[in-house]
Image (cartoon, grey):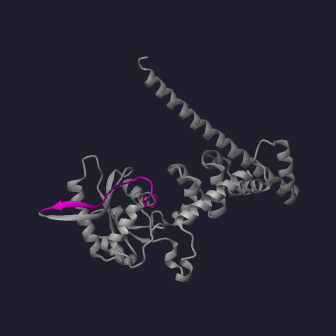
Amino acid sequence: MDGYDDFLRELKERIRSAQVRAALSVNRELVLLYWQIGRDILIRQQQQGWGAKVIDRLATDLRQAFPEMKGFSRTNLLYMRAFAEAYPDQQIVQQLVGQIPWGHNIRILDAVKDPRARLWYVQKTIENGWSRNILTLQIQNQLYNRQGQAITNFNATLQSPQSDLARETLKDPYVFDFLTLGESAQERAVEKELVKHITKFLLELGVGFAFVGEQYPLKVGEEDFYIDLLFYHVKLHCFVVIELKTGKFKPEYAGKINFYLSAVDDLLKSDVDNASIGLILCASKDNIIAEYALRDVNKPIGIAEWQAGLTKSLPKELQTELPTIEQLEAELDAVSVEIADEK
C-alpha cells in the first residue's frame, strides 16, 4: 500500500512519545504521593507526638492494604519522611524533583546534604538524562563543587550569554578515574588512554562535547602543527581545542593555545560557528600565574587541573586495595537491584 510505511513510522513515533509522557506523569504522581505521605508523617509526629514506631506500624498496615505495591517498606517510609523534610515546598516537588525517578531522589538524599547542591543535581539529571549509576558517580566525583571553577578569560573575550554558558561548561579539576597510567606517564600516552576510553572521557567533559580528533593536523604557512585533542561543542556551537600537560602550568602554554585557536578559527571555523575555545589541562597550576597568563590574551581560554582519579592522593599501600571503575559499576548495579526488590 502506498504510504503505509510512512504511516506506520508516524504511528510508532506518536505511541512512543505518548508512552514517555505517560511514564513521566506516573513517576511525577508517585513521587508526589511519597512526598505527601512523608509530609503527613512529619506533621503527626510533630503535632501529636507520634514516635518512631509509627513507621513500623504503617509499613505493616499499608502492605496489608496494598499487597500489590512494593513501596511501603519501613526503609522506604523513612525515605518518604526524609524526602518531605528535605523539600518542604510542594511546588518544587511538582515542578522539579518529581521529574526524576524515586531511586534517583533517594541517591541524592543519601549523598548530598547541601540543599542547593541537591537541587543542582536534580536539575542536571533532568537536563542530561543521567542514569542512577551515572548520577552516583557524578556525586562521588563532586561535580557540583567542580563545575564552572576553571580559570578563564571568558568575560573579556566572549559576549553574554555565551561567556556564562562557556564558563559553566568547564570544570576544575577534571577527574579521569579510568586512567591506569602512573604519574610519570608522558603526554602522548595520556592522550592515547583518554581516546581509548573516549566514552568515559566525554562523560567527564560533560554533555555537548563531540570528539573530532587526536593530534589533529593543522598546516600553517609551510609548517605542520598538531592539536592534542580537538572537540566540537554542540551547545556552544564552537570548536574546543584541548592542550594536555602532565606537569605544572607554564605561562607560555597560553601563547601556544592562542596560536592554535587563531589557526582553527581561520582554517576550520565556518560562518555559523562561534569563536573557538581553548582549554589547557595541567597536572597542577598556580592560580595567580594562570590568571596573569590569560589577562591580555584575546582568545577565550580556560585553565584547569586534571587528575587520574581518587587514588592520586592516597598512600601507595592503599591504592591497590581500591576497586576499579568496573567493580564500582557492578556494585552499583547490585545495590540498585536490592533497592528495587525492597520497594
Which residue is at a point 63% across and 47% down the rendered structure image?
98
Which residue is at a point 32% across and 75% down the rendered structure image?
292
Q: Position of residue 134 (x, y in %)?
A: 54, 57
Q: Is residue 106 left or right of residue 280?
A: right
Q: Is residue 62 left or right of residue 253?
A: right
Front-most of 326 and 174? 326
**Residue 94 visible in the snapshot:** yes
Front-most of 239 and 156? 239
User: Which of the 4 image quadrants contains residue 227?
Assistant: bottom left
Q: Position of residue 200 (x, y in %)?
A: 46, 60
Vertical position of residue 202 compared to residue 91: above or below: below
Q: Is residue 80 magenta?
A: no
What's drawn in magenta, residue-wise?
A: 201-221
Q: Position of residue 164 (x, y in %)?
A: 41, 57
Front-most of 299 and 209? 209
**Residue 87 visible in the snapshot:** no
Which residue is at a point 76% across and 43% down the rendered structure image?
69
Q: Is residue 214 magenta?
A: yes
Q: Is residue 112 left or right of residue 233?
A: right
